[in-house]
Image (cartoon, helix red, strand yellow):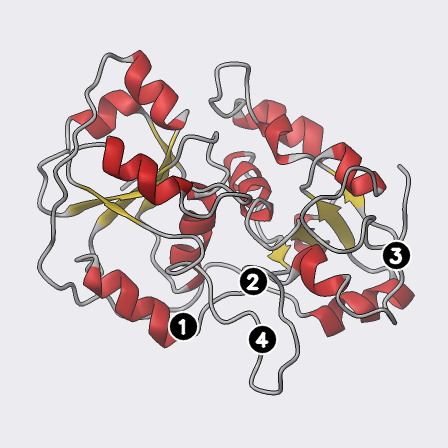
Amino acid sequence: MHTTLISAATLAQHLTDPNWIILDCRHDLLMPNAGREGFAIGHIQNAQFASIDDDLSGPKAALDGVFKGRHPLPDRATFIETLRNWGINDDTQVVAYDAHGGMYAARLWWMLRWIGHQAVAVLDGGMAAWQAEGLPLVTPTVGRARGHITERPTLTSTVSVADVVENLASGRRQVIDARAHDRFRGENETIDPVGGHIPGAKNRFFKDNLQPDGRFKPGAQLKQEFSHLFTNPANAIMQCGSGVTACHNLLALELAGMHGAALYPGSWSEWCSDKSRPVATGA
């Protein structure tokens, strides 16, 4: 069972394994169709496309019309149906990849753990690592027989916006923001309507988890780096712009052996939508 990362060489040995499902999570926040178009041009053999917007997110507004962020989690039952339509069973090994160092694939990794599925891994280095091995991309698409995955006890934890508001006063938990340093400071904000960060948050840009070749740093190095931000991961909250790249930090923490941090799914996009919530700027 692969539960964090998998190498291109190992994945290449299982392309036709009937109990392995490969999902292409490529995306572009500013060009929503780019991932699907890239998939049509070429993808790993037997991969299926997983849309960040359509498959890995739910409605942006709750039933009462309150904005929940740009990529809120879908209803669990809806997500289970999506997984079954991809052919995933309780014992399926799932592999997620993208072309962005795991930026989007980590979201699917976290979500499968969210519904209790442990056998999910991210292709370390993504498409760049695959092609560096001289492995081919294909254009034909495949369909799989409907799966029967069931929800099991979650392997993750989440917090709500109310929890984060409460934490402003208590300070019991450390919020970690995965966005780029300039966006954290409130500069060059082009995605959300307000620049800045949650007061008290610290910045850990998700790309700092990677080596120059796009693969993840070793677990020991990640542990050393994250230990400068907090001492107890069970008291840490991971967030980003919309709950996507925060999952990259959660994957890095898992590699580091630092278990128990929570995801704030709404993240900055939800936080800044209410003018009554405070905003900090600068480092």
Give neighbour class at mark 4: few <14, some 14-19, many 20+ (Cα, 10 Å).
few
Q: Secondary structure at mark 3?
A: loop
User: Where is residue 226 shown, x and y percent of the image?
Assistant: 69, 34
The mark nearer the N terminus, 3 or 2, is 2
Q: Residues within 10 Å of mark 1 (few under 14, many from 20)?
A: some
Residue 279: mark in rendering? 3
Residue position for label 2 = 157
Residue 93 placement, left or right of 195:
left
Quarter holding the N terminus is top left
Q: Which residue is mark 4?
A: 61
Residue under numbered circle 1: 76
| Structural distance between the alpha carbons of marks 2 and 4 | 21 Å
| First in residue order: circle 1 vs circle 4 | 4
Q: Earlier in the sequence, mark 2 or mark 4?
A: 4
Inspect the image, locate mark 2, and give the three-letter code of the amino acid beneath it.
Ser
Residue in the image at 41% along x and 30% along y: 99
Please tell me which of labels 1 and 2 falls first in the chain: 1
Looking at the rendered structure, the kind of residue marked 4 is Ala
Image depth: mark 1 or mark 2 in front: 1
